[in-house]
Each structure stands twice: as C-alpha cells, then as structure tokens.
C-alpha cells in the first residue's frame, strides 16, 4: 500500500484563497487555491521513472498495484495530500500577461522521503483550476510523453530539471487544435506526475508586486528562502540578497547546460522560470540537430524568434531583470539586485567557458581558444553540421594525424561538406596543434569530452516516433527511449541507431521540427 509522508509547508505557511474549487477567478491576497484533481474515466499507467520512484520511497509492488494509476491519474488521494493550484503571473513573449497560475497543474503535497528530502508532487493535466481561464485543464498524450521523457533525459544529461514520476493515460479524449488552423481533433489524454523540491516560479513573485501586495511578497520571499534555500544564512536583508544572487547563479548554470547539450526550451516566459534554476514546463521545446543558433522549435514564436537557441542567455537575463524589479519592494536598496544580475553574467561566462573547454577537450579555454572555438561554431552553422554527432566524434580526432573522417557522418549535406571541406581541414590542423600543446594522453582528453558531449539526446524525431507508436497503443518505444536516456554518455551499441542524425522525413514534420504551444 502506497504510503508517503507529507509535510505541506506551502499551504500551511502561506495564505490561501478562501474559495475552493475550479470556478475561474482572479485570486487576490493568496498564493494558492484549494482544488481537487478531476477524476478520469480509466487511468492506466503507461510508464514510470524507476529513479524517481526510488527517490520517493515507492517500491515495485506499489507501482504494480492499481492504486498507483488511480493516485497519479488524479482519481484518488493519499492520506496527507492537500491539493492546490498556485497563483502566479508572468511575462509572456516580452509582455506582462497578468494572472496565469496553475491552470491544469495540481500540487498534491510535499512528500518527505527517508533521507528527509522534500519532493513536491504535481499532476499536470489533472483538470481545471481557478487559473484555467478558458482552457480545459487537461493535457494530451503527445505533450505528456514529451514532458515525461525529456525531464528524465535532462536529469541524466546532468541538466538541472524538474523530474517526472509517472505517465498515466486518462482514457478520455481531449480536443486540441494543434496547428491553430481551426481544425481541432480529439486526441488521447494523459497526466504526468512532476516532481521537484519546489515548483515556485518567477511569476509567483511577479503577481504579488503587480498587485502592490508587498507584505505577501516579503512573506513569499522569506518562505522560499527558508524552505528551498535552507543553507542561506544571515539576517533577513542578508538572506534576501544572498538568495537573489543564488537564483541568478543557478539560472546561469542551467542555461550554460542547455547550450552544452543543444536544448531549446521554446517558451522562456517568466512563468516558466523556476526559482531553483530548474528546467520546467516542457512544451514546444526542441533539440538542435544541425547547429543553428537562430533555430526555435516553437511555431508560435517563429516570427520574432525570441526564444531561439542562441538567445537563451539574453532571455534569462531579461527574465531575471523582471524578477529583480518585482523583488525591489523587499529590498532597502537596489544594490543587491544589481549585484545578483552581475553574478548572472559572471557565472554564465565562467560556466560556458568551462563547458566549451570540455566540449573541445581542452584543459582550459585561453584567450586564443575563444577564436578557435568560435570559428568551429561558425563552420558548424554554415555547413549545417549535426551538433551532437560533431562533438561526440570530435573525441576521435588524432592530435598527430587529424582527419575529417570521424566527423563525416555529422554532415547533413554532401554539397555543403564539399563546399566547406578546406575550411574544416584547416581548422582541424589548428585544433590538433592546440591539442598537442596541452600534451595530454588521448584517453584523458577523450574521457573529458565524453563527459561533456552526450552520445544520445532526445532528438525531436525520436520523441515523435515514440508518440506515433504510443497513439496506436504501443508504449514500448517510450520505455526504450527512457532506458536509452538513462545513460546518454554511454555508447550503448545495441541502441546505436538512436544516435543517428535527423532523417530527411523529419525535417519539416510537425512534432519534429515544428511544435505549437497546443498541448
Ligand atoms: P504554458 O504556455 O504551458 O506555460 O501555459 C501558460 C498558462 O496557460 C499557464 O497558466 C497554464 O497553466 C495555462 N494552461 C495551458 N494549457 C492549459 C489547459 N489545457 N488548461 C488550463 N490551463 C492551461
Ligand atoms: Mg507554464
């Protein structure tokens, strides 16, 4: 029998909305609203993460019991759960959007595991809440598979992220206009149970300042520090300053990792920014195939490309600036906020330098190396070279006899390869000379590179193939990709085909290179 221990500090320490239930409304003077998951017709467990189950102290027998799908499909509560939806606002695509909130996510409770760690459990797609606006509170299978697989993949890639415990089919259809072209279709519904130490977002603070609720803002700040940053010490003002600096630092690290693995979030609105610097809200995200800093998977953003791959650090900075403005009433002077923003820049530069050095297999990145590595990125862009394959195979370059051969499979176009061959060979000569300068054993360099350059990422077409199969009733590929992504830095020869670059059929296919926010 599933038995979790809950300590629901968010609802116990912060004011809630006096009204219960999902009636759509503006919620003032409160951080959350009590609302229950809406039961579904036929909850069925499709997949779960064994690591997350272990983290929570859930064993195989618990997972096999029918109760598991009932609880994580939203049909049954465990003792100690206190479901609620959080009130938050946000800047969407650069504009203040007012109250947003958990429209379809329902927090079940903060579970405390055997080691005393706090893990907040949240169902996404569990039915409408006061924040659902005109939407149905549900999620479709395709987007739920994408969130489930990608959160676990990111974790194993070493990128800070929310986790996913389970993927449960609801047995109910959900109506979605995937292309926003007036052609809605019924799709199978699903619920993902997300797991994180905290689901607090920049937007939880923004909504309070937007309503001039400075008292509650301060309360939420001090609560977040006490619960989610217990290591921070000092008096109240010192703690708040150190905390903001930490948020900036963690956000910088997260973005540097995204750039390292080729992840494009796609919707970096401030309501999708975690205060813990975790990747959160997997929507129309994508993975870089051919290296292109201009690329965005999000068709809703195709025009302005605000959230394109190469712009993510600037956007994080912009979002942190909005957070700093929002937090201003909780600070005596703006100095700590300015210092935090500077910390973001410093940490981002240091982290991305370290990661670039590791990707190229250099002990460290010197001034002259910046040009060498920038030139490589420019070549990858011009010649449309697969980012993941290029860096993984770069470890095979012989510093004493460099050749383009190990990199050939990373090119998408023979014509572009021939066109840029001389430039690549010249670059390789310089690169090999630089490696000889470090004079490290090839095995040491290769190990460093393999730890920074995954063999496998959750390529857009791989997720889409798994979705197509699952929509026809076969979730085997979801399980296989989950297995694959548990060890993304290992060769896994029996699964080598999942390392292949994007096939031609996927170049312009919906779900592979183009995704809308409809989910
Ligand atoms: P997102 O773009 O997924 O971050 O969502 C933006 C806002 O819309 C958030 O407040 C979500 O909770 C809400 N939302 C998105 N989809 C739905 C849905 N199907 N039902 C209710 N609320 C939703
Ligand atoms: Mg969101």
Image (cartoon, rainbow, N blue to C red):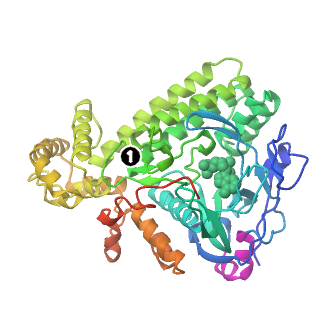
Report whether 458 appears left or right of 183.
Answer: left
Q: Is residue 417 above or below residue 437?
A: below
**Magenta highlight range:** 59-73
Magenta highlight on residue 490: no
Q: Residues within 10 Å of mark 1 (few under 14, many from 20)?
A: many
- Estimate the x, y position of residue 376 in percent, counting from the top left: 23, 42
Give the camera-side residue of 373 and 171.
Answer: 171
Q: Is residue 382 above or below residue 150?
A: above
Report the predominant secondary structure element of the magenta stretch: helix
Q: Is residue 498 above or below residue 182?
A: below
Q: Is residue 156 visible?
A: yes
Residue tagged by mark 1? 295
- Estimate the x, y position of residue 306 in percent, counting from the top left: 47, 38
Q: Residue at x 26, y 37 (%)?
A: 374
- Estimate the x, y position of residue 91 in percent, counting from the top left: 62, 36
Quarter residue 221 falls in: top right
Report whether 468 appears left or right of 364.
Answer: right
- Estimate the x, y position of residue 303 in percent, counting from the top left: 45, 40
Q: Residue at x 30, y 57 (%)?
A: 447
Give the camera-side residue of 428 and 190.
Answer: 190
Q: Residue at x 85, y 49 (%)?
A: 12
Tag 1 secondary structure: loop
Magenta highlight on residue 67: yes
- Rendered-image quadrant of the N terminus: bottom right
Q: Is residue 52 above or below residue 100?
A: below
């Amino acid at each position: 029998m599933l038995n979790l221990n809950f300590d629901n500090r968010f609802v116990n320490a912060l004011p809630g909305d006096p009204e219960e239930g999902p009636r759509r409304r503006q919620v003032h003077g409160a951080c959350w609203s009590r609302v229950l998951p809406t039961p579904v017709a036929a909850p069925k467990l499709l997949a779960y993460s064994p690591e997350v189950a272990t983290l929570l102290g859930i064993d195989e027998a618990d997972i096999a019991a029918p109760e598991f799908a009932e609880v994580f499909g939203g049909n049954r509560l465990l003792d100690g759960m206190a479901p609620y939806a959080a009130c938050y606002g946000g800047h969407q695509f650069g504009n203040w959007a007012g109250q947003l909130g958990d429209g379809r996510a329902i927090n079940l409770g903060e579970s405390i595991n055997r080691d005393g760690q706090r893990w907040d459990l949240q169902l996404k797609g569990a039915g409408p809440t006061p924040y659902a606006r005109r939407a149905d509170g549900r999620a479709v299978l395709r987007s739920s598979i994408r969130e489930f697989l990608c959160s676990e993949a990111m974790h194993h890639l070493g990128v800070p992220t929310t986790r996913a415990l389970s993927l449960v089919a609801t047995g109910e259809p959900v109506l979605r206009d995937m292309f926003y072209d007036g052609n809605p279709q019924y799709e199978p519904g699903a619920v993902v149970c997300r797991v994180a130490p905290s689901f607090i977002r920049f937007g939880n603070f923004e909504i309070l300042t937007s309503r001039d609720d400075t008292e509650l803002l301060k309360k939420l700040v001090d609560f977040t520090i006490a619960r989610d940053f217990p290591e921070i010490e000092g008096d109240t003002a010192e703690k708040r300053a150190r905390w903001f600096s930490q948020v900036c630092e963690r956000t910088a690290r997260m973005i540097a990792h995204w750039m390292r693995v080729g992840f494009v979030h796609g919707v970096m609105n401030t309501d999708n920014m975690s205060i813990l610097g975790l990747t959160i809200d997997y929507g129309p995200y994508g993975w870089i195939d051919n290296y292109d800093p201009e690329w965005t998977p999000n068709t809703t953003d195709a025009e302005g490309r605000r959230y394109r791959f190469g712009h993510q650090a600037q956007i994080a900075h912009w979002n942190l600036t909005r957070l700093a403005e929002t937090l201003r009433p909780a600070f005596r002077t703006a100095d700590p906020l300015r210092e935090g923003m500077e910390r973001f820049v410093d940490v981002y530069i240091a982290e991305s330098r370290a990661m670039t050095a590791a990707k190229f297999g250099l002990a460290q990145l010197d001034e002259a190396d910046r040009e060498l590595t920038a030139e490589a990125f420019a070549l990858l862009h011009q010649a449309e070279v697969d980012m993941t394959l290029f860096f993984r195979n770069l470890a095979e370059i012989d510093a004493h006899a460099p050749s383009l051969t190990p990199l050939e499979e990373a090119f998408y176009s023979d014509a572009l390869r021939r066109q840029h061959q001389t430039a690549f060979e010249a670059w390789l000569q310089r690169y090999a000379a630089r490696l000889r300068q470090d004079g490290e054993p090839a095995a040491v360099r290769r190990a460093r590179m393999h730890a920074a350059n995954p063999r496998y990422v959750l390529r857009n077409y791989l997720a889409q193939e798994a979705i197509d199969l699952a929509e026809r009733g076969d979730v085997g590929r979801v399980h296989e990709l989950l297995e694959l992504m548990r060890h993304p830095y290992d060769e896994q020869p029996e699964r080598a085909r999942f390392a292949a670059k994007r096939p031609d059929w996927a170049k312009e296919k919906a779900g592979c290179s183009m995704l809308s926010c409809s989910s």
